[in-house]
Image (cartoon, rainbow, N blue to C red):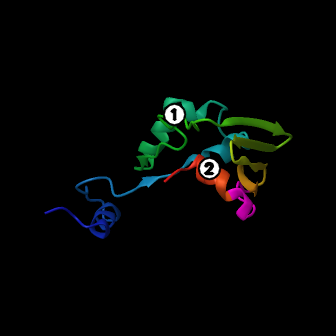
Amino acid sequence: MPLSPRDRALAVLHGRRPDRVPWFGDLDYLATAQIGRGQRSADFKQSAAYLDWHRELNLGFYLQGYFPFKTTFDRCKVTETHEGHTRVRRIETPHGTLQDRWTWLPESFTEGPVEHLLKSAADLPAYQFVLPT
């Protein structure tokens, strides 16, 4: 009989081997911060040491950002530019243009949205074109 998610987590906490990995640790943000602070080499996340780090911590490896596909939008023009620490993406559709902005936050070694694709009901036709149901 398979273990429940709770029983899997308890098995790990008690030093027993569960029937499958109960969760995967997302260490990407921590690794990015350590690289940014000079505590790890710039190529750490692409090295075998990154995988070893997960093994040492007994964590399943979470594939943060390793997407096996490229997002495309049919009949749209997509441009991405950088303005200082801000990444700007524009999606031009036959029904209007959508734009979002993400700014790099050095304090947290991540980026956050400062402008969303949808700003008003007027953006809905373009958004529906980009993401048809």
Type of the residue with mark 1? Ala
Q: Which residue is mark 2?
A: 29
From mark 1 to mark 2, how far is it between C-alphas?
16 Å
Q: Quadrant of residue 91?
A: top right
In the rendered image, the residue lying farthest to the right is 84
**Circle 1: is it few (<14), some (14-19), or many (20+) Cα within 10 Å?**
few
Which numbered dot is residue 115? none
Residue 30 place in picture, x, y as percent = 61, 50
In front of the other: 119 or 69: 119
Which residues are the magenta region? 116-123
Looking at the rendering, in which quadrant would you find the N terminus?
Answer: bottom left
Residue 107 place in picture, x, y as percent = 78, 54
Left or right: 24, with 2 as reference point: right
**Circle 2: is it few (<14), some (14-19), or many (20+) Cα within 10 Å?**
few
Callout in the foreground (1, 2) = 2
In front of the other: 64 or 119: 119
In the rendered image, the residue lying farthest to the left is 1
Taking 87 as reference, is 122 above or below it?
Answer: below
The secondary structure type at the circle numbered 2 is helix
Taking 94 as reference, is 112 above or below it?
Answer: below
Q: Which residue is mark 1?
A: 49
Left or right: 46, with 11 as reference point: right
Residue 124 place in picture, x, y as percent = 66, 58
Q: Quadrant of residue 65?
A: top right
